[in-house]
Image (spheres, helix red, strand yellow):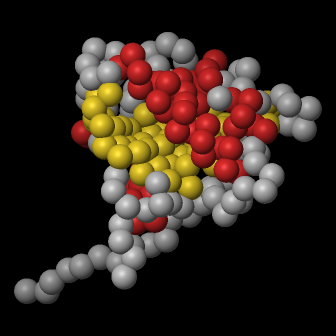
Amino acid sequence: MRSRPPLRVSVTRHEEKEHKLQEFLSQHISRLQPGGDRAHLAHLLLVARSLDSPVVKAITALADEIAAAGLGARVILAHVDREPAPEDWGRGLAFTYEIRWARHPRLVEAHEQLVLGPETCWIGDCMRRDPGKCDAYESYVEDCGEAAGCAAVSFERLWHASQPLVSRTALRGGGIGPGPMPVIEAAPQPTVGTRH
């Protein structure tokens, strides 16, 4: 029986959160470079409070590395009424991305998340807490297919229930153009019921 690796759970000061996320993402990307393991997702799967969230800022800061690794991003936002507007956010990014808005108000009870691969993800604080005003809970998960798989399935379910906002496809010259992205369908999950 394989033992489950411990989760790296921490409480992070809001000033340090973006830097820690950049470091986590950078380490993942470095393993995808030539000679690294390519058995990973083609897109980063991200659920965030808004485009001002530290996890979105971390992805923006590593845009060149993400593009060089051949990755794209699929982003679900809880709030889109803040700056920058989703249409303006990625104009300078060289990777393919798509943004959707989860309009349902109960989403603020969910946690932010970033799925990097089939065994790697980050789970952040719930979206009702403003990360700029408080320290945050977060969990860095590596080598755990169960946690990353559950995060990916919940992302896909939320993705299908969210409203499309922006879709940009990376062009060969390094620019971004409009266009649809391939969507990975979530496998149907069995439901349990009783008959009375």
Q: Position of residue 129 (x, y in %)?
A: 26, 26
Q: Nearer the viewer, residue 162 or 59?
A: 59
Q: How many badges with numbers are in the image?
A: 0
Regarding residue 112, the answer to whether it shows in the image is yes
Along the line of sight, the residue nearer the viewer: 53 or 97: 53
Report x, y in % for residue 137: 28, 35
Q: What residue sits 8% from the left and 86% below the top?
A: 196
What's the residue at 73%, 20% (across, down)? 92
Which of 162 and 45 lies nearest the eye of the viewer? 45
Q: Name which residue lies at 42% across and 51% down.
A: 141
Q: Is residue 158 above or below residue 49?
A: below
**Res 58 quadrant in image:** top right
Q: Quadrant of the N terminus?
A: bottom left
Query: In the visual, does 145 lie left or right of 136?
Result: right
Which residue occupies the foreground of this view, 173 or 12?
Answer: 12
Q: Quadrant of residue 29?
A: top right
The reply to whether residue 98 is visible in this rendering is: no
**Is 126 situated left or right of 142 in this image?**
left
The extreme left residue here reads: 196
In the image, residue 183 sits, relative to residue 109, either above or below, namely below
Residue drawn at point x = 20 percent, y = 80 percent: 193
**Is 78 situated left or right of 137 in this image?**
right
| Residue 126 on image: x %, y % | 28, 36
Of all residues, the one furthest to the bottom in this rendering is 195
Instruction: Work out whether 131 lies above or below 6.
Output: above
